[in-house]
Image (cartoon, grey):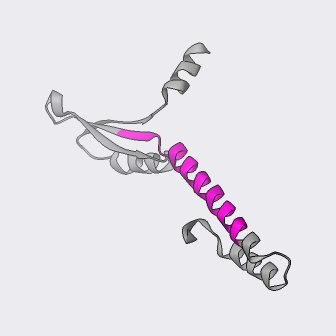
């Protein structure tokens, strides 16, 4: 729970409680709401950001093994950093960054 509450937010609630502006149950309720809000925001953010996959093609490998995949989805900035870091290796033929899209996004783009 502490991960989703900012120290300043809790401190402000404690001050209000000490000045008797809010009750203890109201303070707990506000903390719970804040936790849920921050949890949902972090979950949405992490799902939103980590949609990029870096592919690197090795020119020295056999055809079946030539595609090396960075399989972990990355945030766009991290994918670009990773691609920049590996692009100058001698044996790489190509480095590509691809964005994963949902079926809904695919259908939406198809309609446009």
- Quadrant in the rendering for residue 110: top right
The percent position of residue 2, horizontal first and vertical second, equals 57, 71
Residue 29 forms part of the magenta stretch: yes
Q: Residue at x 65, y 71 (%)?
A: 6
- Residue 93 lies left or right of residue 45; in this view the side is left
Residue 8 forms part of the magenta stretch: no
Q: Residue at x 31, y 38 (%)?
A: 56
Q: Residue at x 55, y 68 (%)?
A: 3
Residue closer to the observer: 56 or 12? 12
Query: Of all residues shown, which one is farthest toward the bottom?
Result: 18
The percent position of residue 68, horizontal first and vertical second, equals 25, 39
Residue closer to the observer: 31 or 100? 31
Provide the residue span drawn in magenta: 28-54
Q: Residue at x 61, y 52 (%)?
A: 41
Compared to 4, does 24 lie above or below? below
Quadrant of the image for the N terminus? Answer: bottom right
The percent position of residue 19, horizontal first and vertical second, equals 85, 84
Compared to 2, does 56 lie above or below? above
């Amino acid at each position: 729970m502490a991960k989703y509450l900012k120290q300043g937010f809790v401190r402000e609630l404690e001050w209000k409680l000490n000045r008797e502006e809010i009750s203890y149950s109201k303070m707990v309720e506000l903390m719970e709401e804040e936790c849920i809000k921050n949890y949902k925001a972090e979950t949405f953010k992490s799902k939103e950001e980590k949609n990029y996959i870096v592919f690197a093609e090795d020119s020295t490998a056999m055809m079946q093994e030539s595609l090396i995949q960075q399989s972990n989805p990355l945030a766009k900035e991290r994918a670009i950093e990773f691609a920049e870091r590996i692009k100058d290796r001698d044996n790489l033929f190509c480095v590509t960054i691809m964005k994963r899209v949902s079926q809904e996004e695919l259908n939406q783009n198809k309609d446009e």
